[in-house]
Image (spheres, helix red, strand yellow):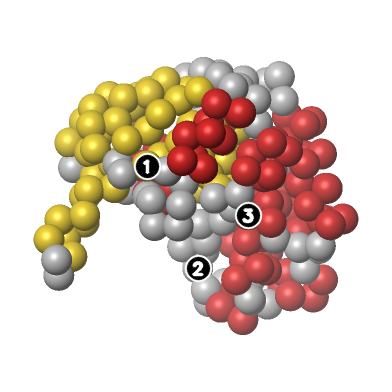
């Protein structure tokens, strides 16, 4: 269970304060896949960072019951001077996981070839995303946070991503943010729309679609 209570987050701009989350209160149930639709710049990535705890709200609180992944697709946590393998070993130790199992799973899943042993700063953004996705799948979380990363790679790799989530359905929740309705339909049962700082939750994806298109 993840709950946001009156969460507000704003950023200073040259035209004034830009409020991306405005007194948002919402509950994300366990073992439920939820998509969050929003236009570019609506604050979707900010919402995930606040849920994950990598960024703090200006006002309000976030309650997390169970383990929550970092935002998949958010590669800022990688040390660019370390290789993909070394980053995996570091993260595995932080989370108390079997190091060799995490490294082996990530290497097979991310399909980076020899780049897995090269510094992450030499990776493309897509390669970083694949590493982040594979590493997150190597660790069992109660909730996975996904930031558009499912669009990375070819059709075969995207199918691999879908299968990974399906394998975890029933025991983990997934929260995906995207501006593409097709992505939400592929992965989610419920949907929310983030628009002008407000988060509107729908049990029906079609209801969310109508609001999203109108916005």
Position of 37 relative to 113 (above/below): above
Please provide percent x and percent y for residue 92.
60, 47
Residue drawn at (15%, 56%) of the image? 17
Would you call the spot at circle 1 few (<14 residues within 10 Å), some (14-19), or many (20 or more)? many
Precedes in sequence: disc 3 or disc 2: 2
Report which residue position mark 1 lands on: 195
Residue 36 in percent (x, y) is at 51, 38
Q: Residue furthest bottom?
A: 122
Which labelled disc corresponds to residue 79?
A: 2
Give the total number of marks visible in the rendering.
Answer: 3
Q: Residue at x 63, y 54 (%)?
A: 149
Check whether the beta carbons of the residues at disc 3 and disc 2 lie within 8 A of each other: no
Residue at (45% x, 57% y) in the render: 40
> What is the secondary structure assignment of the residue under circle 1?
strand
**Where 66 sits versus 131, above or below?**
above
Q: Nearer the viewer, mark 3 or mark 2?
A: 3
Instruction: Tell me the quarter of the picture where residue 26 sits.
Output: top left
Q: In the rendered structure, which disc, 1 or 3, sits on the residue that comes first in sequence?
A: 3
**Residue 21 position in % (x across, y down):** 28, 41
Does residue 61 show up? no
Q: Secondary structure at mark 3?
A: helix
- Give the foreground label among 2 and 1: 1
Q: Answer with mark 2 or mark 1, whichever residue precedes in sequence.
A: 2
Q: Which residue is mark 3?
A: 149
Q: Quadrant of residue 123?
A: bottom right
Which one is in front in this view, the residue at disc 1 or the one at disc 3? 1
Q: Residue at x 64, y 39 (%)?
A: 184
Q: Quadrant of the C terminus?
A: top left
Q: Residues within 10 Å of mark 3 (few under 14, many from 20)?
A: many
């Amino acid at each position: 269970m993840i709950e946001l209570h009156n969460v507000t987050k704003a950023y200073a701009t040259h035209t004034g304060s830009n409020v991306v989350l405005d007194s948002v209160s919402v509950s994300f149930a366990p073992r439920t896949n939820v998509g969050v639709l929003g236009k570019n710049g609506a604050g979707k990535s900010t919402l995930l960072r606040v849920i994950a705890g990598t960024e703090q709200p200006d006002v309000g609180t976030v309650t997390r019951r169970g383990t929550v992944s970092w935002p998949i697709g958010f590669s800022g946590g990688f040390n660019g001077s370390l290789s993909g393998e070394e980053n995996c070993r570091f993260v595995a130790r932080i989370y108390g996981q079997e190091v060799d199992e995490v490294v082996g799973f990530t290497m097979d899943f991310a399909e980076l070839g020899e780049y897995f042993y090269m510094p992450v700063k030499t990776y493309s953004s897509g390669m970083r995303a694949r590493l982040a996705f594979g590493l997150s799948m190597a660790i069992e979380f109660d909730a996975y946070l996904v930031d558009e990363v499912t669009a990375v790679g070819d059709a075969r790799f995207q199918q691999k991503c879908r299968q990974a989530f399906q394998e975890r359905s029933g025991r983990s929740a997934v929260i995906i943010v995207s501006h593409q309705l097709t992505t939400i339909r592929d992965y989610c049962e419920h949907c929310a729309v983030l628009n002008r700082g407000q988060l509107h939750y729908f049990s029906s994806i079609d209801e969310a679609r109508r609001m999203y298109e109108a916005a």
